[in-house]
Amino acid sequence: MVVFGAADLGAQDKVAWCYGFTVDGVPCALASTKWGLRLHLDATAGDADAAGHLAQRVLDKLAAAQRVVNKSVLLPQLDDEIEAGNITITNQYATLRGSYDYFREGAEQAYAGTGRLADRVGLADLIGGSGAQEGWWNTLAMVSAYFSMLEHVLIGSLPFTSFDPVTEDLQWVIGAKWNEKMQKAVKAMNINDPESARQFAALHDIAERFRNTYSHGGFGRDGRAAMSVHLPDVGAVPVTLGKFGVRPELLFVPAVKDDFDGICGVFDSCDDWLANGPLADSYRWVLEGLDFRFDAQFRADVAAARSQGRFEEFLSVTSEHVDALMNMDIY
């Protein structure tokens, strides 16, 4: 709207912005309101049918204009601004946490005999225990969901550390593996304590055994997880037996109730570490639902608030400000 010379009509209660322009002599206004994007046409547009046709023309032209602006004005600036850290990443913690909780509850129900497949008993259930098959499916999904959530939290923690997007490659970190993200966050916080190392080791074990193996088609990253080696005078021996111990049930389902309980224990411990350990302030920010800003001003404000012992105030004021903006009360 700015590039094409529309008139800035300002903001008002429940309206973040409004721009005016004319089409075929008909005054129009485009506004961002609490209830969504709204296009207003003057009554001179004619009857409902005429107004509808004009509205569609306006929307088509606006869409075409946006493509022009994106290509000619915005795209040439993006890389420089990203490298300067002038970006905000949408906080998706609630959605990712919801996925993890959903599959964890599904596994709990399956192992308790109240899952969706409770009336079906297969060989896996006879060998691995009640609900073993359904429990494993949910456990695998739960593990994947937790690491996805953890990666999101670790990226959200970076503005609270010494991480500087001007001198470090933020896009690389965002695309890095979970362990590289955790190592980056820990290093940027100058964390060197046994508890953090213990959390990392426990998570790494679960990632290698479950997430990495089954995110690569069940073969594992080294391609050996699905193999049975033919040993002379012995027979076919699954390579997983040497890695995780001789447990017959693992030949039918890769995880049983005891494995599920152990995984949940590690994840609960990690949650506690995030909430009460060196990343506690950033985790509070994530839980508050606030987006992740990487610009220099925000990082300086965070550092000042923490060093002056007023982080709680900073968090509260920011949350109230964002709520007001979302409700379009501030103009």
Image (cartoon, rainbow, N blue to C red):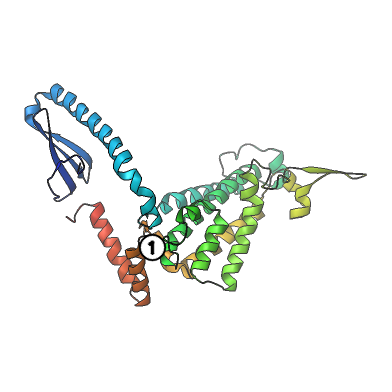
From the viewer's side, name the closer residue of 56 and 254: 56
Name of the residue lying farthest toward the left: 44
Amino acid carrying mark 1 in the image: Trp
Q: Residue at horizontal 25%, vertical 35%?
A: 65
Across and down, in percent, residue 323 comes to 27, 56
Task: Looking at this view, name the residue that lies furthest to the top.
Answer: 49
Residue at image point 37% right, 71% down? 303
300 horizontally vs 193: left or right: left
Query: Can residue 273 be seen at all in this image of the molecule?
Result: no
Give the residue drawn at x 11%, y 27%. Answer: 24
User: In the image as oriented, which residue stretches furthest toward the bottom?
Assistant: 308
Residue 128 at x, y = what percent?
A: 70, 47
Q: Could you say which quadrant of the image residue 72 lies in?
A: top left
Relative height, residue 256 to residue 276 (above, below): above
Q: Return the residue nearer the eye: 79 or 50.
A: 79
Q: Residue at the location (58% across, 71% down)?
A: 195
User: Measured along the vertical axis of the image, is residue 166 above or below residue 67?
Assistant: below
How many discs appear? 1
Name the secondary structure under disc 1: helix
Residue 68 picture location, percent across and down: 29, 36
Q: As displayed, is residue 167 above or below residue 194?
A: above
User: Is 110 left, or right, of 154 in this rendering?
Assistant: right
Query: If the image is split into quadrants, where does the C terminus sit?
Result: bottom left
Q: Could you say where residue 52 lies in the image, as x and y percent from the top left?
A: 17, 25
Circle 1 sits on which residue? 285
Specify the farthest residue to the right. 233
Residue 32, quarter of picture: top left
